[in-house]
Amino acid sequence: MKYKILLVDDDRALLKMLSNFLELKGYEVNTASGGMEAMESIKAAPDLILLDINMPGMDGLELCRQIRDKISCPILFLTAKAEEQDRVNGLLSGGDDYILKPFSLKELEARIISHLKREERHRTKSEYRFREGLMIDYTAKEVRIDGKKADFTRTEYEIIEFLSMNPGQVFDRERIYEKVCGYDAQGDSRVITELIRRIRKKLAEYTTAEFIETVWGMGYRWEK
């Protein structure tokens, strides 16, 4: 299988270099130099998107927010920023990982492979989980409550999947972050706290049942 990667960056020299490298590695590569061009390019259904944050016009965060409900593939941000709030904003906009500029091609390739392998594992799952009207379809990556589909960002869904597949086990914020954000992730409690708050708020629109329990001083667990 030849994976399709979409590169989005206003630096045309970087686009050309990365495109040549990834094509040599056997990937099918499409490029876009801005947000509007990328909106058209996602129609080709890429398997992974490498997205620069700092672009003129529509920046990477806004583009991610606009395309996240149209496409479920991993989105990896390329950025020179390393502040905690930048990572928070990126994950809350629907991104999956950060690659800090300047980066090595070896690291880039490792992260791409890691995320694509995780995608492949998810596609092979065929389990369903039911409880109090809630159904999690691990193949379609959907959550339904009394037959109604609840909309979650990719990272929100990953948290639900991870916790629900390990009911009763307590995980701290750092472990959850590492699990859902993948290769070389660093724990960020602010991100997990906010994402779980959002998950609970969305679930509360459909049901009064509680699914994620806070274990004070320890972390979170999916109630059995």
Image: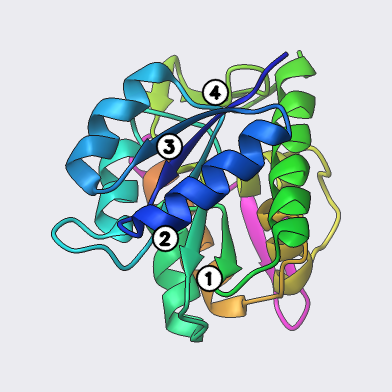
22 and 2: which is toward the camera: 22
Amino acid type of the residue tagged 3 in the rendering = Thr
Whichever of labels 4 and 3 marks the residue nearer the N terminus, that label is: 4
Query: CA separation, marks 2 and 3?
Result: 23 Å
32 and 93: which is toward the camera: 32
Query: CA separation, marks 1 and 4?
Result: 28 Å
**The N terminus - image quarter:** top right
Query: CA separation, marks 1 and 3?
Result: 24 Å
> Is the C-beta separation of discs 2 and 1 under 8 Å?
yes
Circle number at residue 133: 4
Whichever of labels 2 and 4 marks the residue nearer the N terminus, that label is: 2
Q: Is residue 195 above or below residue 154?
A: below
Q: Which residue is mark 3?
A: 207
The magenta segment: 204-221
Q: Which residue is mark 2?
A: 92
Whichever of labels 2 and 3 marks the residue nearer the N terminus, that label is: 2
Q: Position of residue 8 (x, y in %)?
A: 38, 47
Residue pictured at 32% horizontal, 28% vertical: 41
